[in-house]
Image: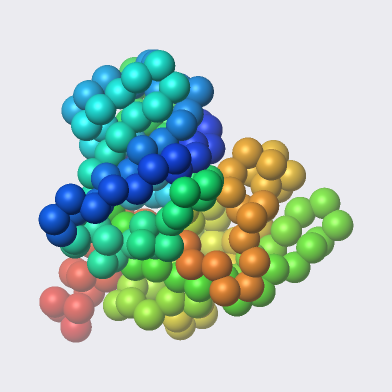
Amino acid sequence: MFTGIIEEIAEVIAIERNKSNVNFTFRANMANALKVDQSLAHNGCCLTVVEQSEMEYKVTAIQETLDRTNLTDWSVGTRVNIERCMKADGRFDGHIVQGHVDCVATCTQILDLDGSWKYTFSYIADHETVEKGSITVNGTSLTVVDSLEGSFSVCIIPYTYEHTNFNEFCVGTLVNIEFDVFGKYIQKYMKKIG
């Protein structure tokens, strides 16, 4: 389980296809603190460390993961938000994030609000957002500002802008979305009784 509080931005330094899987190698300052078999969220997608060294580590993505996320857009040099799993005695600063990406969304608008930024995203999925509810965009825990069918917006403070890959977004950027887990269960329950 994750919280959506980004720890670092890692850089893709190698991509290698192995049958239907893809291995991604990253350079990151925290690489020396990782261990093989550890889970890390990469732009919100939970991937397992399969190799590790002082400044680099490798993860493997299966076809299901590639089909559901923006990982196929990654290339050497891509900068990715990363977060280690939450410790059992850790502080819950974000919200419950599983690292299970529901779908990708497309950035449709970026507004500079003179001290913050408002990003709007559109998506095609059988999920809904709720105003002032939680959403995860590229692994970042955020609060929904505007909630419409098939789209939502979030606002970013300067700290988040500087310490995540939001500062690289433009109109058309594809991002990973994980909807609030409680909202998903409520939505499923309501469909059953409705």
Report how many numbered discs are placed on residues in the image.
0
Q: Residue at x 27, y 61 (%)?
A: 66
Q: Quarter holding the N terminus?
A: top left
Picture colour scheme: rainbow
**x, y percent for residue 145:** 60, 65
In the displayed structure image, the side of residue 51 where residue 133 appears, left or right: right
Judge whether residue 5 can be spotted in this image. no
Q: Is residue 54 left or right of residue 7?
A: left
Q: Quadrant of residue 176?
A: bottom left
Q: Give me the residue at 47% from left, 62% from top.
A: 175
From what the image shows, is residue 66 above or below residue 7? below
What residue is shown at x 30% (from left), y 23% (from top)?
Answer: 52
Report whether 13 appears left or right of 153: left
Instruction: In this rendered view, identify the residue nearer to me: 163 or 182.
Output: 163
In the rendered image, is residue 107 in sight? Answer: yes
Q: Quadrant of residue 127?
A: bottom left
User: Residue 136: percent from the left, percent from the top?
Assistant: 45, 54
Which residue is at a point 43% across and 76% down the rendered structure image? 123
Q: Quadrant of the C terminus?
A: bottom left
**Most foreground residue, 70 or 20:** 20
Q: Position of residue 138 (x, y in %)?
A: 46, 53
Where's residue 34, x and y in %?
Answer: 33, 21
Please tell me whether residue 75 is drawn above or below residue 4 in the rendered image: below
- Find the residue positioned furthest to the right: 114
